[in-house]
Every structure is written in C-alpha cells, then in structure tokens.
C-alpha cells in the first residue's frame, strides 16, 4: 500500500507523520519530532543530513512513496482578495498582478503566490492569498537537497491543518448548524487560528506570530533587561488596538528585534537566508516542549498565556467571530485552556484528532494533514513549488548520470571517429588499387586502337585526369562513365544496342500476313494490301521494342459489306496478343474503281515473345 510522509519543517526542529493506505482509509505508522542543533543552523546540507537520518531511524523499514513539506505561516504575507471567479487555473494567471499592490516591501517577480478559497458568505469569491519569497523557497530546497529529497509539494501550515481538520471524525455531541467552529493550533514558531463553517467550509484564517518556543527565550542566554518593558508595551498595544491584525505582527516584532540587536545581527540574518527556514535564531536550540515547560518559570508561562490569549481575541475580532466553542490542538500548554476561556468568554476544550500511531501517540495535526495530501486527500491546493521551483532539482538529480552518459557518448564518438578514419583509409587504398587496374586495361585498349590504322581516333577512351583535383573514387567513377559511354556507341554502331533490327520486321510481316489470310478467307469479294511500311521502334521506359506497321487495304463490294468487314478487322486484329494499343483505320474513301473503298490501317506489333510466368503445374 502507498505510504506518505508529512513533514512540518521549522527553523529549530521538525514534526512528522507517516501514513499508510489511502486518503479514505489509512493508519498512522509512525509520528514524532526532532530538534536541530545550534551548530547546524545556517548549513543547509547539515540540516538536511540530520533530517534524513532522524526520519530514517524513526520509521526504519517503512519507506515513504511520497513526501509533502509544510512550512510555518509566520512571516508569510497573507491578504484577502475578491475576484469574480475562483477556478484555480484562471486565478493563478492573474493572482500576482492582483496582489502586487499589497507587496510594499517585495517585488512580484521575487515571490510565489498561492491561495485558499474562503466560504464567508460573500456574493463574490474571497481568496486568502499567501506570499512566499523566492529566496526562502530556495533555502528550503537546499536543506531538502542535503537530505537527498525532492518533494513535489511545498505548502504552508494552515493548508495542511485544514486538510487534517476535514479528515478527522467530527466532535461528539449535538451541534448547532449556525455555530462556526473555531480551532487554534499552537506550534513552535507560530500559531494558526482557523474558522470552519458547520459544513466544513473554510471561513477565515489568521496566522498568530507566537509559538511555544517563545518560552525558551533567556533559558540558555542572559535575559535582556529591557525585555519585560518591551513585552508590557506590546501587550498594551494589543489591548488598545481595535482592528488591524497587521499591526499585531508589527508590534510583536519589536521584542524580537531588540533581542537580535544584542546579538550578531548580520550573522543571524545571513544564516536565516542560507537555510531558508526562517525563525528567530536568537532563541536557543535543542529544547523540545517538555524540556521547555520544565525549565521556564511559572511567571513566563503566565505571561505567554496572556499574550497568546490577547492575540487570539484580536484575531477573532478581526474575523467578526464572538461566540461558539474553541478547540485547541498542537502543543498542550498547562493553563492555556482556562486562560483562553476566561479572556474570550467562551467554551475552550482540547481537540482529539481521532488518530494515533502504533504506540498510541497522536500525530501533530499539521504533519498529519501534509501526509494526507501525499495520499491524495487534500482540502487545499496550495503548492509553492511553482514555475522555476517545480523542477528545481530535476537536473541536479540527474547531473551525475547525465555527466557519465555524456562522457560515455564522447568516448563512443572518439572511438567511432577512429574506426571511421581507419575504414576511410582502407577504402581509399582500395579505390587506388581498383583505379590503377582499370586504367591499365583502358590504356591497353587505347594502345591497340592507336597501333591499328583502321580504327578511328574517336574510338579512344579518355583516361587522362592530369590537372584535375579529383579523389581516387571520383577518378574511378569518371573512368567508369567514359567506358560505359564508349560501349553504348560501339553497340549502336555494330547493331547490338536495344534497337530492333530488320529481322524483327520480317517477324512482324509473318504475324500480320498469317492473320490476314486467316481472317479474310471468308470474305466473298476481292481485297488486296498495298503500300505496306514497317518501322522498327527502340525500347523506351514505357514500351518494349516493337514494329510499327502501316498498310493500305482495298475492299471490293457494296458499302454495307465493306463497313462491317472493316469493323470486324479492327476488332479482331486489336484482340491479338502481339498487337499493342489496338489497330486503327481512321477513315476510308472510295477507290478509283466503282464499288471499292480503300483506307490505311495502323498497328503496333510486338516481335518478342512474352515471358512465360513461372508457377506450379
């Protein structure tokens, strides 16, 4: 059965899920997570090797037939766009031009854009567009190249999360058809707030630029003195704002910028571009969720819960959602459920996806959705391996075999050239030998013609090629044509050419006279042949050698008898197997003697006997 590996790839680590089966019926063969090391950051090949070794060691013999990569939505520009149509092919043709006005800091030529369609009840289709820079895609592909992977699909976490939510069993208990379902997925680097209609249609998405890895800030580094003040300012900004979600991202970037300013900013920026995984490299590496929760203080946890709750409340207000339950998935943070319920004033409960691996562990929702897409079950069509990135590693994968094939082809050409040169040299030597022998015979014939005074000089065959720049094979061809021409001239002179000579006319006389005697023996009146003429015709491309006969014939008798006899003569003479093209007498006229008519008959006679066709008797 088919196996699909879904990989949720982040800057500090990864989560994966391996599924076996089909999109409708599948089992979770393996799931888990891994952490990158600080020394690997900024080195795509090292990250790729770590990734491949960790996955291979975890899934063991369960090899994946398909790999789907999902990236965090944090740092990705997301905008809502209205178009009068929603067909994917049409939308993709105009999407960059439509979104270009929103890309204040990016060029449309330097990004890849894709979309999800929202079911928000508007009259015209609403598209949630996501914009990813080309250099980020290139960096991710460089990491995957280190793992020797070439996945055809590269998507974002909200797309994979949508696929997982639509595939899971629906929550138990009665449901209100008018209540919009709210889901919050908390990941390491970012979180996703998603609204689904009761029928499963996507109503809205917000990327929250906060993940549980924020709790690791200061665990391995000295805490910044100004960090609490910056955090309080950020929280105040959240509480005072009343609409634009973009402002939240801008405000939240300030503490990160402050932390980055205290480190080597240029080095961090260079590493982020090199490995393409983005993220905040000022945060310590090697911390998983369990270690992080055990290491950080209760004050830090409480502060994180408050900030995340404020972000969620802001996102729900921007999407005009004020009621209905909220389901938590992803990272399980103690106290987050109660904090969200208190701040939002709604029911909050953890979400059970309804799937587990052989050990009973539930896979990450985003990794599960990515793996489901590899099995052909997808609720979204986003793929950022478009255009130049769709086959970016196509040539790289065949570079080695292609180079080997080219080297082999060049070697074969060299060997073939050497063989052809030797063959050409041998042919040239054979031509020289043949020409020498043929020229000796021609020269002997010319010598005999010169020595005999009875032979004319035009019987000589020209064989002097001095002064002409001819190859040996060309000299041989020229000599052959001159000898052939001399032979034809000699045959015509001696009567041995294809032209039929007078003995053939005698055969035509015999055939014609024998026929006339037999045909006219029942004619009651007199008749006679006069002015007979025989012409031997040479063989042509369309006709063989034959004799053309014209003879005059005079009939005695009344007109009716003569006319019927002429018609019968033409018909029966044309039917003879030795007659070509039939016998014709165009016209008759009255003879010099009364009661006579005369005319000229033309007939072509074959003098060669037709060849008998062979066959079994």
Image: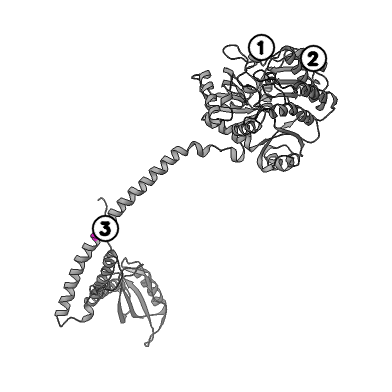
Residue 261 appears in which quarter of the rendering? top right
Residue 345 place in picture, x, y as percent? 83, 16
Task: Give the vertical position of 24 relative to 465 (above or below).
Answer: above
Which structural element holds mark 3?
helix
Residue lying at 30% horizontally and 80% vertically, measured from the top left: 533
Q: Which residues are magenta?
A: 426-430
Q: Are marks 1 and 2 in contact (CB under 8 Å)?
A: no
Coloring scheme used: one colour
Which structural element holds mark 1?
helix
Name the residue that disc number 3 marks.
427
Residue farthest toward the bottom in the current orientation of the protein: 592
Residue 110 place in picture, x, y as percent? 66, 41
Q: Pointer 2: residues within 10 angstroms few (<14), some, or many (20+)?
A: some
Query: What distance separates the C-alpha of mark 1 from that of mark 2?
Result: 24 Å
Image disc number at residue 341 = 2
Name the residue that disc number 1 marks.
294
Q: Is residue 609 magenta?
A: no
């Amino acid at each position: 059965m088919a196996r699909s590996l879904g990989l949720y790839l982040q800057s500090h680590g990864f989560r994966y899920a391996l599924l076996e089966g089909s999109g409708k019926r599948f089992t979770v063969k393996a799931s888990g997570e891994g952490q990158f090391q600080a020394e690997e950051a900024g080195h795509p090949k090292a990250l790729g090797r770590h990734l491949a070794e960790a996955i291979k060691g975890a899934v063991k013999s369960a090899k994946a037939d398909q790999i789907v990569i999902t990236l965090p939505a944090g740092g990705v520009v997301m905008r809502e766009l209205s178009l009068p149509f929603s067909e994917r092919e049409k939308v993709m043709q105009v999407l960059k031009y439509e979104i270009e006005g929103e890309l204040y800091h990016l060029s449309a030529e330097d990004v890849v854009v894709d979309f999800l369609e929202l079911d928000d009840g508007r009259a015209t289709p609403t598209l949630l567009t996501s914009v990813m820079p080309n250099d980020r895609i290139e960096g991710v592909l460089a990491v995957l190249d280190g793992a020797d992977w070439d996945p055809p699909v590269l998507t974002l976490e909200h797309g994979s999360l949508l696929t997982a939510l639509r595939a899971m069993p629906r929550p138990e208990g009665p449901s209100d058809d008018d209540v919009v379902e709210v889901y919050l997925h908390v990941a390491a680097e970012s979180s996703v707030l998603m609204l689904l209609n009761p029928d499963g249609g996507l109503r809205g998405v917000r990327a929250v630029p906060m993940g549980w890895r924020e709790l690791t800030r200061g665990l391995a580094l000295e805490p910044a003195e100004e960090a609490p003040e910056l955090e309080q300012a950020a929280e105040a900004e959240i509480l005072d704002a009343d609409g634009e979600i973009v402002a939240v991202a801008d405000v939240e970037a300030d503490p990160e910028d402050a932390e980055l300013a205290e480190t080597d900013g240029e080095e961090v920026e260079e590493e982020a571009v090199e490995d393409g995984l983005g993220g905040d490299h000022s945060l310590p590496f090697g911390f998983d969720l369990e270690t992080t929760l055990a290491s950080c203080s209760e004050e830090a946890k409480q502060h994180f819960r408050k900030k995340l709750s404020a972000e969620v409340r802001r996102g729900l207000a921007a999407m005009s959602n004020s009621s209905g339950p909220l389901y938590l998935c992803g990272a399980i943070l103690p106290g987050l459920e109660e904090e969200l319920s208190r701040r939002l004033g709604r029911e909050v409960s953890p979400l059970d996806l309804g799937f587990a691996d052989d050990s009973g562990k539930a896979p990450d929702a985003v990794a599960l959705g990515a793996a489901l897409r590899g099995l052909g079950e997808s609720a979204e069509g986003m793929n950022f391996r478009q255009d130049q990135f769709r086959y970016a590693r196509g040539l790289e994968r065949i570079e080695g075999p292609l180079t080997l094939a080219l080297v082999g082809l060049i070697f074969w050409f060299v060997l073939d050239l050497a063989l052809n040169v030797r063959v050409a040299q041998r042919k040239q030597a054979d031509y020289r030998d043949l020409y020498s022998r043929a020229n000796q015979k021609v020269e002997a014939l010319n010598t005999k013609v010169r020595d005999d005074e009875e032979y004319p000089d035009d019987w000589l065959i020209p064989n002097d090629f001095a002064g002409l720049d001819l190859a040996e094979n060309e000299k041989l061809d020229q000599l052959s044509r001159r000898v052939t021409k001399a032979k034809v001239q000699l045959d015509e002179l001696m009567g041995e050419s294809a032209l039929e000579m007078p003995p053939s006319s005698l055969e035509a006389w015999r055939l014609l006279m024998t026929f006339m005697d037999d045909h006219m023996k029942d004619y009651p009146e007199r008749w006679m042949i006069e002015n007979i003429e025989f012409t031997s015709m040479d063989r042509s491309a369309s006709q063989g050698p034959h004799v053309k006969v014209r003879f005059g014939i005079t009939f005695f008798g009344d007109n009716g008898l003569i006319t019927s006899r002429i018609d019968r003569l033409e018909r029966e003479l044309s039917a003879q197997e030795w007659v070509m093209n039939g016998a014709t007498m165009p016209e008759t006229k009255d003879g010099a003697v009364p009661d006579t008519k005369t005319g000229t008959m033309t007939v072509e006679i074959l003098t060669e006997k037709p060849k008998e066709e062979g066959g079994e008797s």
